Image (cartoon, grey):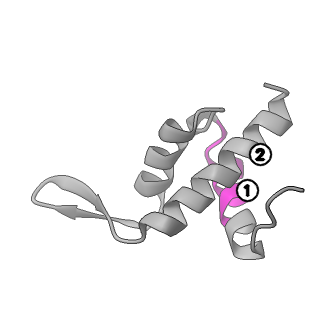
Amino acid sequence: MGNIRQTYIKRVAIELIRHFPEEFNGEFAHNKQKVIELTDLGVMVEGKLQVTHKKLANRIAGYATRYMKRKRGI
């Protein structure tokens, strides 16, 4: 059985992919960084990007990765 994700995680991930299709790929670490950059889950502190909601960013990036793999057949 697979994981069931909440609607808001799916909605945010799909909207990010629709608005920035070239930014996401099938690699989780890359997608995690892009989710932090493109949403308000990260905050600039002393010129460095820090995550305020790490678990939520991980869940969105995980779904975005799975969605991209399924969509592109990777």
| Secondary structure state at the residue bearing disc 1 | helix
How far apart are the alpha carbons under marks 1 and 2?
8 Å
Residue 28 is covered by the magenta coloring: no
For the N terminus, the image quarter is bottom right
Task: Tell me, yes or no, whether the two marked residues, 1 and 2, touch with CB atoms within 8 Å.
Answer: yes
Instruction: Kindly indicate the quadrant of the structure image that contains residue 25.
Output: top right
Magenta residues, start to end: 12-21
Task: From the image, state whether disc 1 or disc 2 is nearer to you.
Answer: 2
Q: Residue at x 49, y 66 (%)?
A: 55
How dense is the environment of label 1, judged by Cα within 10 Å: few (below 14), some, or many (20 and up)?
A: some
Q: Is residue 62 above or below residue 27?
A: below
Question: Viewer-proximal residue, 65 or 46?
Answer: 65
Task: Determine whether, in the image, residue 19 is placed left or right of residue 49.
Answer: right
- Please give the label number shown on residue 14: 1
Residue 21 image offset from top left, x and y in percent: 66, 40
Residue 24 image offset from top left, x and y in percent: 60, 38
Residue denoted by label 2: 67
| Mark sitting earlier along the chain (1/2) | 1
Residue 48 image offset from top left, x and y in percent: 18, 53
For the C terminus, the image quarter is top right
